[in-house]
Image (cartoon, grey):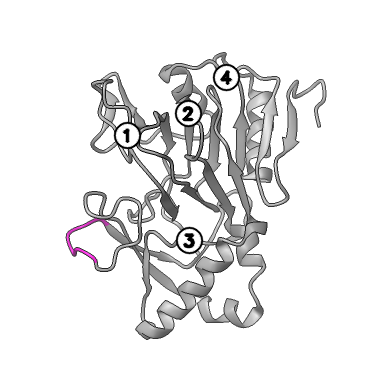
Amino acid sequence: MSDMKTRFKITPLSDALGASITGVDLSQMLSPDIVADLRKAWNDHVILVFPGQKMDEADQEQFCRYFGELQRVRSTALNDDHPHTLMVTNVKDTGMKTALEDGEMQFHYDQCYYERPSDGSTLYAIEVTETGGNTRFSNCTLAYESLPDDLKRRIDGRKALNYYDYAAHPTLRPDSIDADAPQWVHPVVRTHNETGRKALYVNRLMTIRIEDMDPDESDEVLGLLFDVIERPEHIYEHRWRVDDLVIWDNRCSVHARTYFSPDDRRMMRRVTIAGSAPVA
């Protein structure tokens, strides 16, 4: 849909989540009305895809500021002039610091192992693979709403430990944890601070256990929740094209990366929007 007020078109990409936004140039300053309409579209669709954008790192940072404060990259920022920008690439000849270069990556919430995870992130596609390297997004609000009432009662008020060891287990669930690696306890179900809707806030890659629950029961419940989150009807899979800009809501959606050959070049630029501590 589109109108004279927004001057851009919104095209849903799946029944679960995601919309394509066309008719707006993100390299230009946006009016307050356009920003308000984009924020509404973000809340409505969770994932927004802007195809065919020509953006440098400053443009991407400017766009993210419409949605909140930028979050500094902790260790692998692009450079001192762009401390909020991260390159996610397997390309070795750039001379840039990079992160998460190769292969499949399981579903996860960004930074759920910190006290204040990000509200959202953007990726801008500079080089893409011929096959694989897609990003799959799951709507964790729909996942929560689809749960049977007895399972909702089992997780009501519960908290879970989220953990991530980038050096040892960057893309696949660990068999054991290092006490010194980043970790934090958050609600199993969080409430979105803008929409007021509840979403499952657990994920296969980083959620280790439900606190104060028998280990076997914790494993059982988490397994059920992971399976619900990863149901096809809750997922949109994005096949990247050069100059795509994608923004996702990290408060209510998890994402995963499909396998791609390490011989294929893939280069993405990421800028992240800072957030607050999740609440039930």
Kindly indicate the quadrant of the structure image that contains residue 45.
Answer: top right
Q: Nearer the viewer, mark 4 or mark 3?
A: 4
**Badge 2 or badge 3: first in the primary sequence:** 2
The residue at which mark 4 appears reads as 53
Q: Amino acid at mark 4?
A: Gln
Q: As shown in the figure, which amino acid type bears the numbered disc 2?
A: Val
| Location of residue 244 in the rendering, given as x and y in whole percent from the top left corner | 56, 27
Q: Residues within 10 Å of mark 2 (few under 14, many from 20)?
A: many
Q: Nearer the viewer, mark 1 or mark 2?
A: 2
- Name the kind of residue labelled 3 in the image: Val
The residue at the point 67 percent across, 24 percent down is 34
Which label sits on residue 29?
Answer: none
Mark toward the start of the polypeptide (1 vs 2): 1
Q: Position of residue 191 (x, y in %)?
A: 55, 59
Q: CA distance from mark 1 to mark 4?
A: 23 Å
List the residue tagged with mark 3. Answer: 279
- What residue is disc 2 on? 128
User: Mark 1 and mark 3: span between their CA atoms?
Assistant: 23 Å
- Whether pointer 1 and pointer 3 mark residues with C-beta atoms closer than 8 Å, the reply is no
Residue 77, compared with residue 101, is above or below; it is above
Q: Tell me which segment is drawn in magenta.
A: 177-182
**Contact check, label 1 and label 2, Cβ < 8 Å:** no
Check the picture and name the quadrant holding the N terminus.
top right
179 magenta-colored:
yes
Q: Position of residue 55 (x, y in %)?
A: 50, 17
* Whether label 1 touches label 4, CB < 8 Å: no
Q: Residue at x 29, y 32 (%)?
A: 98
CA–CA distance in space, label 4 to label 3: 35 Å
Could you tell me the amino acid type at mark 1? Arg
What residue is shown with label 1?
A: 72
Image position, residue 231 (x, y; %): 61, 62
